[in-house]
Image (spheres, grey):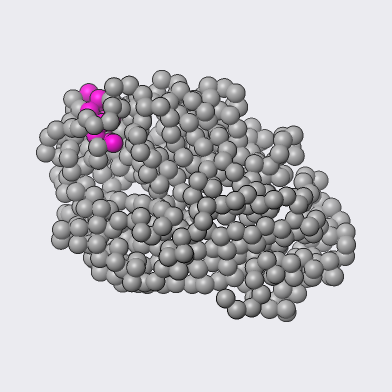
Amino acid sequence: MTGPSEVELAGQVIELVRRLGGPATQAEAVVTRADLALTRFANSSIHQNVAESTVGVRLRLHVDGRTAAGSGSVITTEGLHALVERTLAAARLCPPDPGWPGLAAPAPTPVAPPVDETTAYADPDQRADRVRAFVAAAGGLSTAGYCRTAHRSSAYANSAGHTSYGRSAEAAMDGIARRDGADGVARRCADRLADVDGAELGAHAAAKAQAAADPVELPPGRYEVVFEPAAVADLLQNLAWYGFNGKRYAERQSFAEPGAAQFDETVTLVDDPLGASGLPFDAEGTGRRALTLVEAGTTRAVAHDRRTAVEAGVESTGHAIAGGATWGPMARNVRLSGAAAGPASAVGRSTTGTAAGAVVDPDTAALVAGVRRGLLVTDLWYTRVLDPKSLVVTGLTRNGVWLIEDGTVVRAVRDLRFTESYPRALGPGAVLGLGAQPVRQPDRVDGAWWAAPPVRLASWHFTGGASG
C-alpha cells in the first residue's frame, strides 16, 4: 500500500477541520479502503469479472448548532481541502440540530476476529474455481449467479480525540440452476473463501430445480410452512430494519416492546457483528458488540446510535450507519437461534418420497417430517412493508415451493403471494420447530448477513398466486 494509511488520512481530515472551521467545530471522519471483486456467470459460463479498489472519506460536522455531512474519493491535499470546505458551507445552510448527541469520547476499540488474508486478497482464479465447481455439479442444467469477495480497512477519528481502526473480509456465492423455467437456488456467506463450496451449492441448486418441475396451483389461505434459511433471512432483515430500530421505536412506528414476550419461547435473536469478520466500530466510532434483541421469546432491546440513545436515556449499542439521521440505527448481522421445539425438530429424521431427498437437507427434513399438510418455501422476495407498526409485509415466494403431506414433500407448487405480520408469525406458540444449524445468508449490502436455521411455522397467510 502506498501513500498515507487510513488512520493518517482520518487524522489529516480532522486537522483540516480545525484549521478551516475553528476549534469550536465538532468533526468526525471515517476513511475506508475497499477492495471489492465479483465474478458473474450466466448460461453456465463466466461472462464478467470485475474488481475495484477505492478509498473513500466520510465527514460529519457540527458547528453553530447545525450538522452537515459530506463524502469524497479524491484523496489528495486539494481534494480533502475541498471536502472540508463544502461540508462547512453546507452546515451553514442546514437547519438547527437540537438533537445533536455530541461525539464519541476516547475508548478502546473492541477486538475483532482475525481477517483471512487469502480471502482479503483472493484472485479471479480462486473465484472462478468455485464457479466451475458450481456449474459442474449442476449436471448440465443452465446456471447463473456470482461469487464475490470483499476486503475493507477502515479508520475513524474525531475532534474529541477518539480513534479506531479495523479490517473485515467476506466471501459469498449465490447461484441458480434452471430446468424448463424452474429455478433452484443456493447461497452462502462466509469469512473465508475456502468455506464456500461451489460443488455443494451447485448440486443443491440443481436438485431443487429438478424437483420443481410441473408445479400445481393451490388456493390462497393459511398454511403451515417450513421456511428454509433463505426465506428466514427476509424475516430477520425486516424485523431488524423496521422493528429493532431505535429511531422507529422512538417514533412509535415499531412493534418492539422491550420486556414483553412477543415471540415464541424458542426464538432468540442476537445481532452479532463480531461473530464473524467485521469492522469493530460503527459509523460514529462506537465499539460494536453482540446485542441480544430477543431472548427466549422476550424482546430485550432495540438498536441505538448516539442520537437515539440520548433520546432514550441509554448508551449507543454501536449501530450507527451513514445516513442514520434519516434511516435510524440498524442491526445488520442477526443470528436466529434457540431450543428446538417439538418432536418435528428431532435431528436425524428424514422424509420419504421421490422429491423429498432432492429438496431438503437433513436439518430441514426433520421439520418437514412433522407437517401433516403444509408448504415448504425456499425463498421470499420483492417484499414490501404495508404497515410498519405491526410489520405487515407482502411479497412473493421464489425459487421453489412444495406441498407437504404427512411429513413427505410430494410435489412442486406455483409461486404464491403472501400478506403476513412477521412478529405474529413468530409469536408465542407459532413456532413449531427450529433447525439445528444456522446458515449465513449474504445480503445485497457487503458486510451485512443473516444467519438462520430452517423454521417451521404454524401459519402463514398466502393471499393469491404470483400474478395477483
The front one of 394 and 209 is 209
Q: Nearer the viewer, residue 377 or 285?
A: 285
Vertical position of residue 17 compared to residue 207: above or below: below
**Image height of 230 relative to 46, above or below:** above
In the rendered view of the protein, which quadrant contains the C terminus?
top left
List the single residue furthest toward the left.
Answer: 354
Q: Residue 19: x percent and y percent?
A: 85, 70
Up/down of 1 relative to 280, above or below: below
Q: Is residue 75 found left or right of 278 in the rendered image?
A: right
Range of magenta residues: 363-375
- Image check: 450 left or right of 407? right
Residue at left offset 18%, top offset 54%: 179
Name which residue lies at 56% across and 52% down: 112
Quick check: can you spot residue 280? yes
Give the residue displayed 28% in from the left and 27% down from the top: 346
Residue 241 can be seen in this image: no
Query: x, y percentage for residue 354?
Result: 11, 38
Give the residue displayed 42% in from the left and 43% down from the top: 451
Quadrant the N terminus occupies = bottom right
In the image shown, does 436 or 442 lie closer to the viewer? Answer: 436
Residue 136 in picture, x, y percent from top left: 19, 62
Reply yes or no: does residue 4 show up in magenta.
Answer: no
349 horizontally vs 166: left or right? left
Q: Nearer the viewer, residue 119 or 78?
A: 119
Q: Position of residue 392 (x, y in %)?
A: 47, 33
Q: Is residue 366 magenta?
A: yes
Residue 304 sits in quarter: top right
**Total count of labels:** 0
